[in-house]
Amino acid sequence: MYISNQKDIEKVHVGFFPVKGRYFRTEMKSRGNDLFELTADLPKGRSFFHYFLNENFDKPMNNNGAMISQYDSLKRSPIVFETEIFCPVQFENNPIFFSHIKDAEWEIRAITHQQWIENVSIVIDENEFHLSEQYSHKNKSYWSCRIQLNDDEINYCIKISGYKQVKYLHEKNSLKDKIDSRSMMKINLSEQKNFAEFPAFNAGYQIFPDRFLKKGNHNANVDLKEWGDLPDYTSFFGGTIQGIIEKLDYVSSLGINFIYLNPIFLSRSYHRYDCADYMKIDPLFGTEEDFALLIQEMNDRGMKLILDISLNHCSRDFFAFKDICEKGENSEYLDWFEIYNLPLKPEEKNQYSCWHGYHELPQFNLANHEVRNYFKNIVKYWMKNFQINGWRLDVCTEMPDDFIKIFTDEVKAINPQALIIAENWHNTSSVFSSETGIDGFTNFSLYLDIMIPFFVQENISLKTMCSKILEMNYSNSSKVNRLSWNFLSNHDLPRFRSIIKDSEKYDMAFALLYSLPGTPVIYYGEETEMLGLGDPLNRGCMEFVSYVENEGSIKLLQDLNDLRKDFYDIFNYGNFSFPIINNKEKKLIVKRSLNDKTLVFCFNFNNISHEFILDSDTKNTIVVEAKSFEVVFYKNSDSHYSSLISGTNKNKLASLV
């Protein structure tokens, strides 16, 4: 429903960004008295929407109070449809709830929704394994356990009990009073195992190529804006591959072991998401020789490279689309796109399917076998000739699963350890089928549901934040959680340092980011507290300063990245819990543990110092200063602990340049 306060509004359209599938726009029905209504079918989960008034499709509108960000140029607001849970225990026979960790170790998780439930366990044959309650908030409790399983296949059910009740969850969410061997859940463990052990993607660094460093000759006739000037939506600044190579030692010194590059292929725009030729590096950016040298220099430093690619849409300069413009219905590429009207006229809109209504970005017909074969060849060219280590798939939720699977199969056939990350603005990886081959996704749920409400809007408590973290964590398998990218800023978002309400908590936000399951990715310049609100201001030119006046963000990120490297097994395969959540004193402990080794992140969000009990058995304590944190390590068999990182130890740093 839309109620207009402007008398001249005659038509209202709504544009939807669904959880899965392509963006679509539809007209609302006028009910008179400035009231417009619409009924739309949307899938379960979080979608986004915005309005257009009087067919002005170049200017999206929305209620500022409901938007995901006041700096979002698309003016998106979330709309969430969730299925009501009638079963008291939430569990599904899939990797989200029954997840392989490593070797013979498996993690079983469940969520309960009624207070009478006091115990949860998994029953396998004659054996019963109890799950521990990780956290409870209102009527919702999170449970998990880890067990060793060496069988190829098992039959099992989930047992819940409490208040003199015992129930058993079987297949198809069937809840029974006793075990029924005929309807037990079955799982093939050999098929679920993560046989391809991933290399260590400890921490990433995102580089927006045009804005990182300008160096070397520029082989294109493009007017460049003065380096450091205010960015706009169209200007080039001239960052190059050679500039990235020159600063690899700088990036490596941060403790980074992979770089994520925004698109580098031939394009008419500075952001290069409108690709004109997927087989060519944009000459403004460099040459294939430059790119080969970049790969070699990164390999020499033990670093990996992930490339960004837009498979869903391209530029109107793309050869197949240009052929349609020239030959019309006689073009052999007519079925490569979804064409509504011929002949195509550059000045006319709504002639073909285009990304979110932008006619500069025609969308591929991804069901076409020739289009699929074209992108398979793109994969072969860049992975076989340059040995890149993976891909970030732009607008991945808008592409069909079977196409994604063809792409990922081609990638994995060349390099089973290649990383494939899906851009996903929604709250779960379940929008993709398990067969797509996606390894992880861009974790916008962490940003939108946790980091923004807690650090920017400051409108949720610690307990609510932890509940949201667990809800996010229990929406994906352990492997997906581990490989997904966690971030505070990127090229689509305002820089976090510009919007955080209390700048003293900037370092605490990074520490929390690093404490949680997932792979942290730093947006270029965050380490120097670079500023910039929404697009295009968040894509400013990198400035390599001699001294960091903010006292410590570089050193902090170095320490956090070293921590992830030194305790790789804990971060990738360890348990995760919240031993202390204290709203009143604003204290939080995030615990990461594996076998007898434990890392504890102690956060004090209060204005006064607080004492933390590190372990209930040893009663060891540590004092954490106001608005600060401590990272502590100890062994369960040892009464002593070591403080590894202190949020209060900040000194001005000599230049890394």
Image (tube, helix red, strand yellow):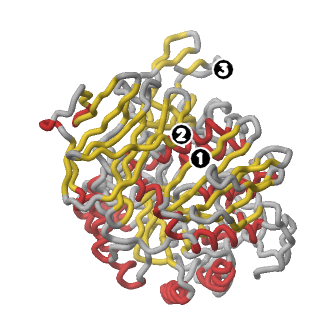
Contact between marks 2 and 3 (CB within 8 A): the answer is: no
The first of marks 3 and 1 along the sequence is: 3
Q: Position of residue 477 (x, y in %)?
A: 39, 52
Q: Position of residue 195 (x, y in %)?
A: 30, 69
Q: Position of residue 615 (x, y in %)?
A: 64, 53
* Closer to us: 415 or 145: 145
* Circle 3 residue: 6
* Circle 1 residue: 578
The type of residue carrying mark 3 is Gln
Above-or-below relation of 356 to 270: above
Picture quadrant where residue 65 is located: top right
Residue 304 appears left or right of 351 = right
Is residue 369 something one can see in this rendering? Answer: yes
* Closer to us: 444 or 482: 482
* Circle 2 residue: 135
Secondary structure type for disc 1: strand
Disc number lying in front (3 or 1): 1
Q: Position of residue 491 (x, y in %)?
A: 61, 58
The type of residue carrying mark 2 is Tyr
* Closer to us: 475 or 329: 475
Residue 97 appears left or right of 250 = left
